[in-house]
Amino acid sequence: MAILITFSGSVGSGKSCSAKWVRQQFEQNGRRVSYLRFRFLSLKYLFGEPRRSKQKKVKSNKVNGAKRFENFIPPEFTLKHVVLYLWRAVQLRLILAVRYRDQVVIIDRYYYDNLVQFSRLDKYRKKILLLTKVYPVPDLAIIMDTEVSNLLKRRGIYSEDYLEHIVNNYRELNSLIPSLSYVNTNELEQINGRLEKLIEKFISHSVEEDKN
């Protein structure tokens, strides 16, 4: 079975750079590693990793100069969303079973990153718990946690209200999914050291489980 490690967090939290850094650490130790981006996963991966077309650069501001997600109103988490995410869970299970057995799979973003976009998560406890039972449970699920003030410095094109909503929901996820591991990324130069300790602890725990 694949070892699954996921990285989640708001824009500017350092998740993508950290995911790629952890990938390098495993590769340097001779492990087979695949780096995937959750938003692009589809059944096409059953036949190999498809080439992605070059993404267009996102303009920093709207025409009127407003920041992205200005006057953000969190959407409701509807049954339509649940069905969509359940289908994505089925696809991911197939992809991992067919293409990535016996590998370390690092996924940049996960369904957690979709959940935080919605309004208060405690309203949707039952729906979220259903998803936790259907989606592959990561062997290590990392949430990159950063204060809003730091995110505004790194990604000033986003509105403060939007970032506050996202950060609060990431933290609220901890009460719904206790297995998540939070890494403080307020000081970027310290992230790799914190991740290294977390990965070492994870590997040591995995070795002990194999022995037992």
Image (cartoon, helix red, strand yellow):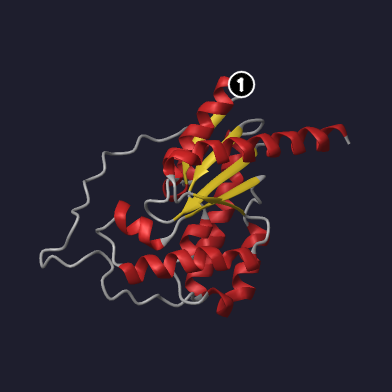
Residue drawn at point x = 32 percent, y = 74 percent: 72
Q: Position of residue 147 (x, y in %)?
A: 43, 60
Amino acid type of disc 1? Asn
Residue closest to the eye, 35 or 148: 148
Q: How crowded is mark 1: few (under 14 residues within 10 Å), some or many (20 or more)?
A: few
Q: Mark 1 points at which residue?
A: 29
Q: In this view, does 81 lie to the left or right of 58?
A: right
**Outermost residue toward the right?**
212
Q: In this view, does 80 lie to the left or right of 203?
A: left
Could you say whether the residue bearing mark 1 is in a helix, strand or loop? Answer: loop
Q: Where is residue 40 in the image (x, y as percent from the top left)?
A: 42, 46
Residue closest to the eye, 137 or 80: 137
Residue closest to the eye, 132 or 180: 180
**204 lies above or below 178:** above
Can you say which quadrant of the picture contains the N terminus?
top right
Q: Position of residue 134 (x, y in %)?
A: 65, 59
Residue drawn at point x = 48 percent, y = 68 percent: 168
**126 lies above or below 157:** below
**Outermost residue toward the bottom?**
123
| Corner quadrant of residue 5 | top right
